[in-house]
Amino acid sequence: MSPLVETVLFVFGLVALGYLAGATGYLRAEAGDQLSHFAVGVALPLLLFRTMLGADFQGAAPWGLWATYFAAVAVAWAAGHLVTTRVFGRDGQAGVVGGVSSAFSNLVLLGIPFMLGVFGQEGFEILSLIVSVHLPTMLMASIILFQLFGPRSSEPVHPLRIIGDFLRKIFQNPLIIGILAGLAWRSTGLPLPSLANRFVDALANIAGPVALFAMGLGLRKFGISGNIRPALVLSGLKLFVMPAVALGFAWMLGLPPLTAKVAVAAAALPSGVNSYLIATQFGTGQALASNQMTIATACAAVTTAFWLTVATAVFG
């Protein structure tokens, strides 16, 4: 078994173990929620904090990386929206859910441990460049589209209120806090005290396995119910169209090999829970988002290995 295949199986195997723990009743779904809160609220922010302290971003081509990844996001989002509204006849709000389901990669719970396992610390440092702008960009796009396609309020919402809500959500996010805190400490040039370093290492080192297991346990409560055909089509857009566009842009822009492979792998990851949360906010498309997330995650064990193989053949 090749190291690449073994790593992919290990990563998705931890997700499967979490799912089985919930499916068999060994652990309750509430345990998955708590583990996810711990991973996203404590362990992963500390992992990002530690990465910001020692990362060497030279040669990571952030502008080319961002252009590659978000071009793929734009294409997949537009395709998902059009398929949902034009092919399956859903309204504009459901179209937003379809678009975000096709474009919002699970870069945190799945992406961070996945990149660490496949590309090591250097690959994770490149991914952190995407993570640092991914949430703000996707959240702002979701807010704008919510205003365009959401229910019309009798009172117009002032743009400053929208911006204020956006900034509050961003600066309250633990991942963003971890990144900013790491950059702030790095700017001082001071070493982290040894005791603090031990605390950070102890929690950061378990971030990946806990996140993967929590993700699998969390998937158990979503399940699959109705809207199978559109969920399958949106999963196809997420797992095939988005990474294909990323690969094409990475090649055209001449990204360094590792940066290009990370961009393609990030685009190939399945959707996370954010699409379901947006569907819940809209009050429509919850089953569609839930089904798509579950189906795409199950299929991603095979499709991510495929895209990693293709990217390695193209970029070396």
Image (cartoon, helix red, strand yellow):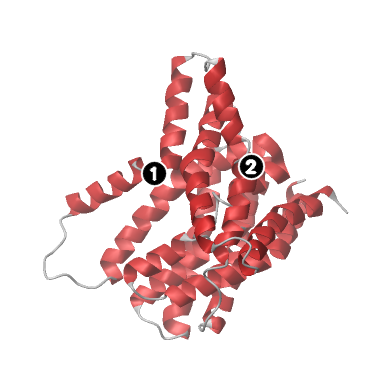
User: For numbered disc 1, what is the local secondary structure?
Assistant: loop
Residue pictured at 35% horizontal, 45% vertical: 170
Q: Which residue lies furthest to the right in this view?
A: 1
Residue lying at 53% horizontally and 56% vertically, measured from the top left: 31
Residue 138 is labelled as none
Residue 295, percent across and down? 60, 72
Circle 2 SS class: helix
Q: Where is residue 247 in the image (x, y as percent from the top left)?
A: 64, 55
Neighbor class of circle 2 (other Cα within 10 Å; few <14, some 14-19, many 20+) is many
Quarter where residue 16 is shown: bottom right
Query: Quarter-wise, where is residue 1 in the image?
Result: bottom right
Amino acid type assigned to the residue bearing label 2 in the image? Thr
> As displayed, is residue 244 above or below residue 117?
below
| Residue name at image x 39 percent, y 69 percent | 279
Which residue carries the number 1 mark? 173
Q: Can residue 58 be seen in this view?
A: no
Q: Position of residue 189 (x, y in %)?
A: 48, 14
Q: How far apart are marks 2 and 1 (CA)?
A: 26 Å
Nearest the eye: 224 or 62: 224
Query: In the picture, which quadrant includes the C terminus?
Result: top right
- The answer to whether residue 303 of the structure is visible from this angle is yes
On residue 259, the disc is 2
Toward the viewer: 66 or 6? Answer: 6
Task: Tell me if 279 is positioned left or right of 268 in this view.
Answer: left
Q: Earlier in the sequence, mark 2 or mark 1?
A: 1
Q: Which residue is drawn at 71% across and 44% down?
A: 117
Query: Viewer-proximal residue, 205 or 147?
Result: 205
**Badge 1: residue crowd in 10 Å (few <14, some 14–19, many ≥20):** some
Percent position of residue 98, x then y: 45, 72
Amino acid, disc 1: Asn
